[in-house]
Image (cartoon, rainbow, N blue to C red):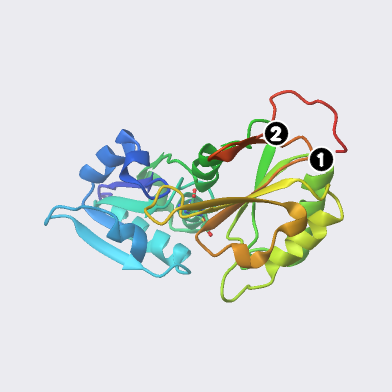
Amino acid sequence: MTKSAAGSLVVVGLGPGSPDQMTPEAAAAIVGSEDFFGYFPYIDRLSLRPDQRRHASDNREELARAKAALAMAAEGGKVCVVSGGDPGVFAMAAAVCEAIEDGPAEWRDIDVSVIPGVTAMLAVAARAGAPLGHDFCAISLSNNLKPWEIIEKRLVAAAEAGFVMAFYNPISKARPHQLDAAFDILRTHLPADVPVIFGRAAGRADEVIRTVALKDAAGNMADMATCVIVGSPETRIIARDGRPPLVYSPRSYRGGSA
Ligand code: SAH
């Protein structure tokens, strides 16, 4: 029995938005691919040659997109799946792995590689100073793929453990109340003056970075293009005349309330 030659599938992180924040490795992987699968706005960001093909799909179709990309690679294609930021952070790399685990045996013969990218929390943190300078965690506030009770449990655990938290998917039209609910939970576990950074569209022309105290943080300060970083009791703000404050978490633990 002859086996058809499996092609390749590369999962590429495009970074948060600015071409300057895409790695040369990601740019080279794009040049070397023929068929591109991804969410519409990410596919739109690519400058492709006429011989390279676009297969854009909607945000909620990640598993179907991964399967379509794998099926094409299994037929010998040089396929690229794109994600914003890093493809391994709440994005397509895990969807591709899920599809391979549950898919036909021949998908395991595909040459799969993952190219990292600058994830949103790093782009936002860099603009604010160094809020992730000590221990931190990242939590998606979307309950599309996990129950809200699990999110609540993780928020409390992270606050009690003294982690800085980066929230992805903080809010959407279908989930308008979750970020306020998260702040309410955190206000019962963290000091009122803990800094909260709202980093919107980091690395893009419409970028806005804003820092408020936890007591003043509100869900309407974020949209779905925002990554929210909640400081720990150790996180500090350095005020500066005529310049935005520097928000940072010192490298060493000084003993806060956590
Ligand atoms: N793989 C992506 C995250 C996908 S989840 C990454 O590594 O960045 C989508 C969420 O990412 C958004 O709801 C928002 O919270 C965050 N996000 C993506 N791009 C962003 C940007 N340029 N600025 C701020 N947050 C961003």
| Left or right position of 228 against 18 | right
Q: Residue furthest front?
A: 241
Which of pointers 2 and 1 lies earlier in the amino acid sequence? Answer: 2
Label 2 crowd (10 A; few <14 / some 14-19 / many >=20): some
Decide which of 186, 169 is in the foreground and name it. 186
The residue at the point 73 percent across, 58 percent down is 216
Question: Does residue 87 appear in this view?
Answer: yes
Q: Position of residue 46 (x, y in %)?
A: 26, 53
Give the CA separation, mark 2 to mark 1: 10 Å
Say which quadrant the C terminus sits in: top right
The residue at the point 48 percent across, 69 percent down is 60
Question: Does residue 39 appear in this view?
Answer: no
Three-letter amino acid code at the position of disc 2 = Asp
| Left or right position of 258 against 140 | right
The residue at the point 82 percent across, 52 percent down is 156
Q: Position of residue 10 (x, y in %)?
A: 34, 45
Rendering quarter of residue 241: top right
Q: Residue furthest top?
A: 252
Three-letter amino acid code at the position of disc 1 = Ala
Q: Position of residue 138 (x, y in %)?
A: 64, 47
- Kindly identify which numbered label has been placed on residue 135: 2
- Kindly identify which numbered label has been placed on residue 73: none
Pointers 2 and 1 in contact (C-beta within 8 Å): yes
Residue identifier under label 1 = 161
**Ligand 1 within 8 Å of the CB at mark 1:** no
Rendering quarter of residue 117: top left
The residue at the point 85 percent across, 28 percent down is 255
Q: Position of residue 203 (x, y in %)?
A: 41, 47
Q: Secondary structure at mark 1?
A: helix
Q: Secondary structure at mark 2?
A: loop
